[in-house]
Amino acid sequence: MGFVDKIKGAVSGHEDQIDGAIDQAGDFVDSKTDSKHAAQVDQAQDFLKGQVRQGSGTPEQPQT
């Protein structure tokens, strides 16, 4: 089992928890930068969430 396969296995079934951690990290960055870079942070969060879903084989959830 390769490195990527190990990561996919670790992510599988935990997508919601990882999404929550990505949101918390983005909120932390926003709080430290007074939301000066909120658009870029949101874009990075969306990208990372997409990568998590793609890597685990779970379809992307629509934005709310």
Image: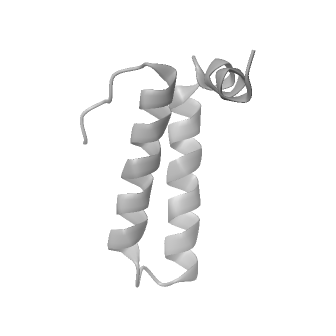
Tell me where residue 54 sits by quadrant: top left
Question: Which is more toward the observer, 62 or 56?
Answer: 56
Point 55% across, 71% down: residue: 29
Image quadrant in which the C terminus is located: top left
Relative image position of residue 41 (x, y in whole percent): 43, 66
Relative image position of residue 55 (x, y in whole percent): 50, 28
Question: Which is more toward the observer, 61 or 7?
Answer: 7
Question: Which is more toward the observer, 57 or 14?
Answer: 57
Asked if residue 19 is positioned above or below residue 6 in the image, the reply reads: below
Relative image position of residue 39 (x, y in whole percent): 32, 71
Point 57% across, 37% down: residue: 18
Asked if residue 57 is positioned above or below residue 28 in the image, the reply reads: above
Relative to 18, 47 lies left or right? left
Point 41% across, 20% down: residue: 58
Tell me where residue 1 sits by quadrant: top right
Asked if residue 44 is positioned above or below residue 49 in the image, the reply reads: below
Point 51% across, 63% down: residue: 27
Relative image position of residue 47 (x, y in whole percent): 40, 50
Relative to 22, 57 lies left or right? left
Total numbered labels placed on residues in the image: 0
Asked if residue 63 is positioned above or below residue 28 in the image, the reply reads: above
Colour convention of the picture? one colour
Relative to 11, 47 lies left or right? left
